[in-house]
Image (cartoon, grey):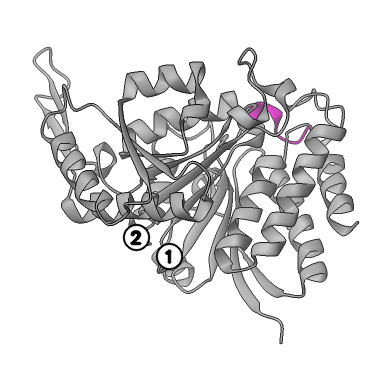
Amino acid sequence: MSKSYRIAVIPGDGTGPEVIREGLKVLEAASQKFNFKYEKIIYNLGGENYLKTGEILPESVLEELKKVDAIYLGAIGDPRVKPGILERGILLRLRFELAQYINLRPVVLYDKRFTPLKDKSEEYIDFVVVRENTEGLYCGAGGFLRKGTLDEVAIQESINTYKGIERVVRFAFEYARKRNKKRKVTLCGKTNVLTYAFDLWERVFHKVAKDYPDVKTDYAHVDATCMWMVKSPEWFDVIVTDNMFGDIITDLGAIIQGGMGIAAGANLNPQGVSMFEPIGGSAPKYTGKNVINPLAAICALAMMLDFLGEEEAGLKIEEAVKRVVREKLESLAAGRMGYSTTQVGDLVVNYLES
């Protein structure tokens, strides 16, 4: 008997609906080829809905999202809405409310033509960043004193708990085993300056490492991590880090793998509802032009299917994406691919079906 999944779809803002459209096209082809069923439930959350109704993420919708098998997200961000309102009200709230404490970001180069790094080919860029996703500076702890005056003070606190660190570090070690490549986990931190938060991170990291004698360990300051990601990305296998540093180094990772058009990510609750998305944002200047690269959204779909247990479907979608990148595209950048958004989606479907 074929399995069936309830998938919440949030097309979102800007080019989000365009890339999600192509992802859903691939999902339909995959369901036919690999014999699974799905029900998609569309939620029109984002800037347009907020401007019309004043609602960001209604409680009723949040309760419904807690009952689906996965969430497929296009993008959040509308230039007509003050920055932070939609991002905190939708993205961060979903991560916190659904306890999506792992942000998983593969950094994989599919074609050496598209990395800006000199003399680095596909075998040099293949690692994963495991970012803590619900603590750190993103908790919103802090406030203002004497706001609006010349004596104003702004405080933003980084919250790090033993439990929060332990579960993300353990996930990183398990993931290194699952990848079975270098079997190496690198802790990215700043122990020489952030002597409280990363003292705890370091102690937990080494304690958990004792349970994984088959996995090598390493440490690098965040600034050194950025340097080595550019100079010697082949050193890395799995990088584990906190929320802020993870946010920064994953964008660097996206660029060395070819750009935001190919960068996909997952917000995981290994025991609950997870959310999958392209990480490039809404790219409003390309909205409606049918030129945006949908491959990041399609790769996010592959990650979603793998998480749901449809590993073969996820793998074959990724293989189809690789073929499209290597055999068809002139660039991974919007408007320069040599194909439209719709055509790129069709190419992936054709390779998947064949």
Tag 1 secondary structure: helix
**Residue 62's mark?**
1
**Residue 286 within the segment the image draws in magenta:** yes
The image quarter in which residue 197 lies? top left
Q: Earlier in the sequence, mark 1 or mark 2?
A: 1
Marks 1 and 2, Cα distance to the nearest angstrom? 8 Å
Residue type marked 2: Glu
Q: Is residue 326 left or right of residue 127?
A: right
Per the rendered image, the range of residues in magenta is 284-290
Residue 57 position, x and y percent, is: 43, 56
**Residue 12's mark?**
none
- Which of 36 and 208 lies nearest the eye of the viewer? 208
Residue type marked 1: Leu
Residue of label 2: 97
Tag 2 secondary structure: helix
Name the residue rendered at 52%, 50% in the picture: 180
* 317, above or below 311, in the image: above
* 310, above or below 202, in the image: below
